[in-house]
Image (cartoon, grey):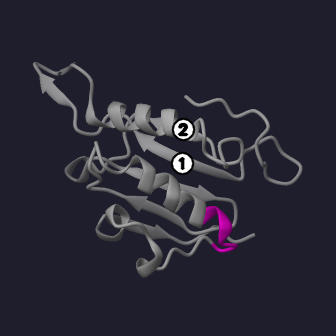
Amino acid sequence: MTATTNMSTTKGTNIPSHTLFVCKTCATTWQDGKRIGESGGQKLLQQLQNLSQDWHLKNDFPIQEVECMSACNHSCVVAFAGTGKLTYLFGDLPIDNSASAILECASQYYAKPDGLLPWSERPEPLKKGILAKIPPLPS
């Protein structure tokens, strides 16, 4: 999991105000009920962690691995969540060509007060892969 020190937090708490969730189980090969090798989700997670070292939001938008996001037919899967914002779940993301687009879209999400990501403004890999747009909890 990526370190979460020096991050933007929800007012009065130590909870991050934004999180990028990455399913590390996506695109897993199974044999006899056991994982074989490295999953596509683990590869995508590693790419995101490596790219995020130079990302301007690395301290404000932590990357959190998730064991499973229950979108197995749409791997690889990530989600953007922010306090008081829409939550987005994206799937069908290519393992090798989407990490930079994910961070670019996360930057757009971070900049929007409500988190709204119009289709036309999203990077290409995140235009087709929307699985859910969940309203924020009422404040």
Three-letter amino acid code at disc 1?
Answer: Leu
Q: Residues within 10 Å of mark 2 (few under 14, many from 20)?
A: many
Three-letter amino acid code at disc 2?
Answer: Gln
Q: Answer with mark 1 or mark 2, whichever residue precedes in sequence.
A: 1
Q: How far apart are labels 1 and 2 at the CA level?
A: 6 Å
Q: Which mark is residue 20?
A: 1
Write the start and end of the magenta stretch as one range.
109-114
| Position in image of residue 134 (x %, y %) | 49, 68
Are the residues tagged 1 and 2 within 8 Å (C-beta)? Answer: yes
In the image, residue 125 sits, relative to residue 112, either above or below, namely above
In the image, 105 versus 4, the foreground residue is 105
Q: Which mark is residue 61?
A: none
Q: Which residue is mark 2?
A: 64
In the image, residue 16 sits, relative to residue 80, either above or below, namely above
**Is residue 95 left or right of 47 when viewed as pictured?**
left
Q: Residues within 10 Å of mark 1 (few under 14, many from 20)?
A: many
In the image, 133 versus 6, the foreground residue is 6
- Count how many numbered circles sit on residues in the image: 2
